[in-house]
Image (cartoon, helix red, strand yellow):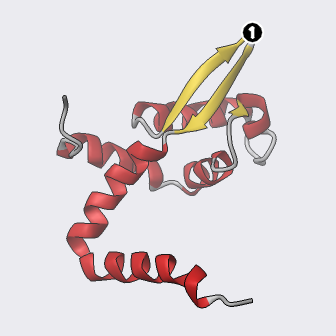
């Protein structure tokens, strides 16, 4: 079985992919679930070919997956891959913040007595 740590060049590819605001917005949009390429393109004021290039970069970095459904291409967020790339870096740079956020998220429902 392969290690969960990613090689540095793969991690760098993911960071290059998320450096662009359009690609970050695509990732956020996919958070809600699978979307067709046309649906994604319709959310932006740029051409469909430009969105296709952005999707290609995200796919190349392993941050999205695609599947064909008849003549449509459906994209999904590759959550684990994104978490591995960004999470390793964040935990190396600011481990205390990761621990604090995790603690706050886990304790929030307990503190909410309403």
Crowdedness near tag 1: few (<14), some (14–19) or many (≥20) residues, C-alpha within 10 Å: few
Residue 107 as seen in the image, left or right of residue 7: right
Q: Nearer the viewer, residue 19 or 105?
A: 105
Residue positioned 75% across, 9% down in the render: 70
Which corner quadrant of the image does residue 38 belong to?
Answer: top right
Q: Nearer the viewer, residue 23 or 84?
A: 84
Residue 44 as seen in the image, left or right of residue 19: right
Q: Residue 109, percent across and down?
A: 59, 80
Residue positioned 64% across, 45% down in the render: 30
Q: Residue 111, percent across and down?
A: 58, 90
Residue where numbered disc 1 is placed: 70
Q: Secondary structure at mark 1?
A: loop
Q: Nearer the viewer, residue 15 or 111?
A: 111
Residue 112 as seen in the image, left or right of residue 104: right
Q: Residue furthest top?
A: 70
Residue 91 as seen in the image, left or right of residue 105: left
Q: Residue 110, percent across and down?
A: 56, 84
């Amino acid at each position: 079985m392969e290690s969960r740590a990613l090689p540095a060049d793969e991690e760098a590819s993911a960071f290059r992919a998320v450096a662009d605001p359009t690609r970050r917005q695509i990732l956020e949009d996919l958070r809600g679930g699978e979307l067709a390429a046309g649906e994604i393109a319709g959310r932006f004021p740029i051409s469909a070919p430009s969105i296709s290039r952005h999707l290609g970069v995200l796919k190349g970095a392993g941050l999205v997956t695609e599947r064909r459904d008849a003549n449509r291409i459906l994209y999904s967020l590759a959550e684990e891959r994104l978490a591995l790339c960004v999470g390793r870096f964040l935990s190396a740079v600011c481990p205390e913040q990761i621990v604090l956020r995790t603690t706050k998220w886990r304790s929030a429902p307990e503190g909410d007595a309403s």
